[in-house]
Image (tube, helix red, strand yellow):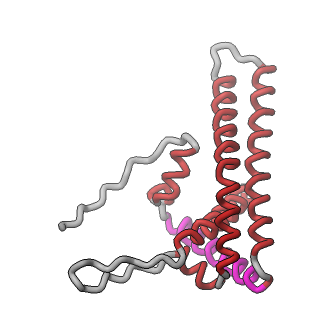
Amino acid sequence: MKPKISGYLIVGMMSLFALASFGYGQTVPQPLTGQPAQAKPTDKRDAILRELALTDEQKIQLRELNKARKPLIQAAQKNFRDAMRALDASIYADVFDEYAYGLRLADLQKAQAELQRLRFENEVNIRKILTPAQLGTFRDLRKRFAAERKLRETNGDKLPDRPIVRQMQRRQGQPLPPAVKRPVRPQ
């Protein structure tokens, strides 16, 4: 179970890193009232970009990598979800068919293997873009994020309340927990 979780953590960090390259360098518009905008808390993506000190060429390479990877990952995720549904249908059919179950299980395993292959292939490609110094920094960041995640999990922080987790659950067809009601800000 731990290798699966750490694999997802690695994939998540690499995706976060790649997504961060899109927003880097954008300016925050100032309000028309002439008052400076309130400083927002430091975003992890911005922190990653600052610490890695990516060149413009590296940022372009990451964008292109993500652009090429996105449709492949989406197709593999859809195939995995479809295989999961077919396996569930096979298991809970009115009449259980051992042969159909075996076929659906094999389909699910192939879909999962393809999804993991694409994810790790992406990580290898990102690694090729980073310099040795950036790779060392990125390893340190991954360790720090893993420690933060472990601390949150031990303290009972519920990850499904986070927007990115909710989005991932929605894409995977998992039932979503009830939304947290947040107070409305007066305007």
Which residues, given as a range, are shown in magenta?
Answer: 133-156
Figure quadrant of the N terminus: bottom right
Task: Give the main secondary structure of the magenta stretch.
Answer: helix
Magenta stretch encompasses residue 22: no
Residue furthest to the top in view is 95
Task: Look at 55% across and 81% down and name the residue there.
Answer: 47
Residue furthest to the left in view is 187
Quarter assignment of residue 86: top right
Q: Is residue 36 above or below residue 92?
A: below
Give percent across and percent down for residue 63: 64, 65
152 sits to left or right of 31: right
Q: Is residue 36 above or below residue 160?
A: below
Task: Look at 63% across and 63% down and name the residue there.
Answer: 15
181 sits to left or right of 148: left
Figure quadrant of the C terminus: bottom left
| Count of marks placed on residues | 0
Quarter assignment of residue 38: bottom left
Task: Look at 74% across and 68% down and name the residue there.
Answer: 126
Give percent across and percent down for residue 8: 68, 58
Give percent across and percent down for residue 158: 48, 60
Along the viewing direction, whichever of 138 and 30 lies nearer the viewer: 30
Magenta stretch encompasses residue 152: yes
Task: Look at 76% across and 86% down and name the residue there.
Answer: 133
Along the viewing direction, whichever of 117 and 37 lies nearer the viewer: 37
